Amino acid sequence: PDVPKFMQHQNPKIRATKIACGATATFVVAGEPYNTTYMFGITKKSGEANMYPTPVANVQGWRARSLSIGNTSVLFASERSLIAWGPSPTFGELGYGEDEPKSSTVSNP
């Protein structure tokens, strides 16, 4: 991958290793040794748009294995974890089954 335009003024060794585009947002992962994920656009309808790439603080330093973006939801898979986020209420609830939690911060056996 080539260096995205917004990174050209930064360290020339930064390379985009993953790029994921959703309906209104784009995520770019800068790989080793930085492991930084940047987001620009908007992921929730009631929020402000990030017109310039902004680091995603919750996953800084994590090695992204996979990244996927929908209309308003984001899935980020690292070496050992899967993080999903999006606005509330959301139709992309977890599939734990009837009468089970619709969201979770821990894995469900």
Image (spheres, rainbow, N blue to C red):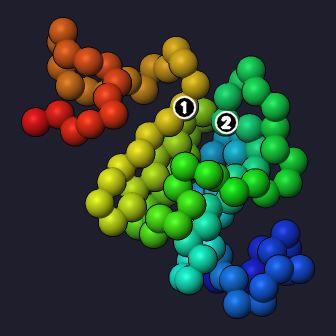
Residue at 78% x, 85% y is 11
Q: Quadrant of the N terminus?
A: bottom right
**Residue at position x 84%, y 69% from top?**
6
Residue 43: which numbered mark, if any? 2
Q: Nearer the viewer, residue 59 or 16?
A: 59
Task: Please state if 92 lies on the left or on the right of 23 as rendered.
Answer: left
Residue 86: give its label.
1
Disc 1 residue type (three-letter): Gly
Task: Tell me the distance, in whole angstroms, between the alpha carbons under discs 2 and 1.
Answer: 7 Å
> Residue 101: x and y, percent?
26, 18
With 39 as the anchor, is 92 left or right in this view? left
The amino acid type, in three-letter code, at marker 2 is Thr
First reached walking from the N terminus: tag 2 or tag 1: 2
Up/down of 75 relative to 19, above or below: above
Q: Quadrant of residue 3?
A: bottom right
Residue lying at the far bottom in this picture: please name it.
Answer: 13
Mark seen at residue 14:
none
In the image, residue 74 lies at what x, y percent?
52, 43
* Residue 71 vertical placement versus 64 (above, below): above
Quadrant of the rendered image containing residue 52? bottom right
| CB within 8 Å, label 2 to label 1 | yes
Q: Nearer the viewer, residue 2 or 48?
A: 48
For label 1, the crowd category at 10 Å Cα-Cα, with few meaning under 14, some 14 to 19 and many 20 or more, is some
Q: Is 63 positioned to the left or the right of 13 in the image? A: left
Whole-percent x, y for residue 26 in the image: 69, 53
